[in-house]
Image (cartoon, coloured by chain):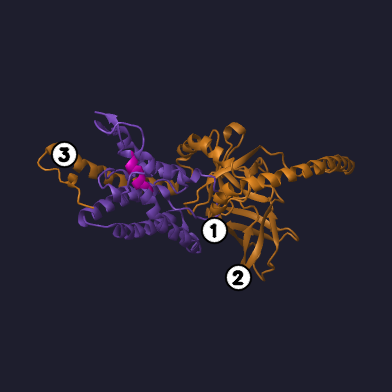
Amino acid sequence: MPVPIPEHLKDLPRPRINRAPSPLLAMSLPWLLVMLGSLSPTWPIVSSAPVMPPLGFLFLLGWLHLRPGLLPVWAGLPLGLFDDLLSGQPMGSAILLWSLATIGMDYVETRFPWRGFVQNWLVASAVIAGYLLVAAWFAGVHRQPDLLLAMLPQIAVSILAYPLAAQLVGLVDRLRLIPVREV
Amino acid sequence: MAPSSNRRPGSSRRAQYSTFLAYVIAFAGVIAGVAVLLFSTSNAGAFASLRSGATDAVAPAATAAAASRSESQTVWSALKGYFTYGVRVARNEQELAEARVKLAEAAALKNENARLKALLELRESEPKPVAMARLIGSTSTSTRRFALLGAGRNQGVAVGMPVRSPLGLVGRVLETGDRTARVLLITDTESLVPVRRASDGVPAFAAGRGDGTLQLRLINLGTNPLKVGDAFVTSGSGGLYWPNTAIAVVTRLTRDGAIARALSDPGTTEFVEVQPLWEEGTAAQQLTAPPAAGAR
């Protein structure tokens, strides 16, 4: 969701006129934020059950909702590959699911162009729950059906974490478009 | 939000082609995902070098972050730790002073112990560790249970080596990078450890359930001799894991065995010990494949 410029950034001593956003920042920050979310397995939290929300995927959904068309429709391929390297899922799981999510979001965007945040959250909830369950199936959860019960907290946390992720995406979107380049 | 106009390229042929190409690449991504997924699920060791390369690249930041945790680390306690720092420092300093005294006493006891052991001609059954390292992270979003270890080939860690903490068995090394290694935790659904009851040696298999508990499957079927509270240790049969490493305590009985709680919570252990392989002659090529396939 779009956020206003934070107060401490408003007062930066910089000229206001004849400035434009830096194209490097504007183009790279969305990719970097999603990749940063994919790095969450290297955080110092060693857990004995799946508990953390898939942050990279939440950030990807946040960007697709906030700025449709900013991440290209093929963005799921490289970003999913990066996520697969660290997530512990079988290789290819995120490539497939993130590509499908990007294409699906593109379809939702063309089919229902006028949406509010609540509709976005509903769509995201369905997509997140589906993503986690299918990813668990790829990882072999059908051989251990009890594990589905242990996944319910993770699904709930991920759905509740989506507005926070979207808020962070909105903040990074602000930073991305700060006019720093002289024209 | 207002519909964006950038998906209608107008009459520009170049814009039409680039929109079309974007969709072609996107669907190629789906097909590539399916292909890679099928390949990697049928070949367990595939892409190991790619993955360990990636973990090597992010290891410095992860190691620095892991160094900051010292007490039991669940998600919430990781956050809480930052707020209770001062109290803990004061308490630790007091404990350190007391521990110095005890250390001197322990050194004397150790000497005496060594003398007595030499007298009895007992051999040490515990192996000399290959490396001591931190667990620097785990796959906390995935249903698979892997941990990242802050030591790799450069420290002498090799595929298949058992990893233990002071409390018990943690898992075994699955893939190695130069400075990191990927550890298959005993709670992973693909992990299978031969165990026996500590008191009388009833043999069983401990299979991970993915949620922090283990399923104990008895090898000899019949009446279930297990009781809640029974402690299990590794049996060392089949090679790989050293015998007599503590692993789990029974919490609930099932029809053909029991559910047990793993003793070593990898989240609460700061340093783990990589042990050499038990029995050098075991087939190393089998170690890269998950052991569960043959036993299920």
Q: Upstream in the sequence, badge 1 or badge 2?
A: 1
User: Could you tell me which residue is drawn at 69 percent across and 45 percent down?
Assistant: B90
User: Could you tell me which residue is drawn at 59 percent across and 31 percent down?
Assistant: B154
Q: Which mark is residue B15?
A: 3
Q: Quickly name the residue at label 2.
A: B255
Q: Residues within 10 Å of mark 2 (few under 14, many from 20)?
A: few
Q: State which chain is coloured purple.
A: A
Q: State which chain is coloured orange.
A: B
Q: Report, in whole angstroms, how far the alpha carbon at label 3 lies from the one at label 2.
A: 65 Å
Q: Report, in whole angstroms, how far the alpha carbon at label 1 lies from the one at label 2.
A: 20 Å
Drawn side of residue B172 relative to residue A155, left or right: right
Q: Nearer the viewer, residue A114 or A143?
A: A114
Q: Which image quarter holds the C terminus of chain A?
A: top left
Q: Quickly name the residue at label 1.
A: B211
Whether residue A173 is in magenta: the answer is: yes
Q: Chain of mark 1?
A: B
Magenta segment, which residues? A168-175
The main secondary structure of the magenta stretch is helix
Query: Residue B21 lies in what quarter of the image?
Result: top left
Regarding mark 1 in the picture, which secondary structure is present there?
loop
1 and 3 marks in contact (CB < 8 Å): no
Hey, what amino acid is under mark 2?
Arg
Is there any visible trace of residue A173 in the rendered image? yes
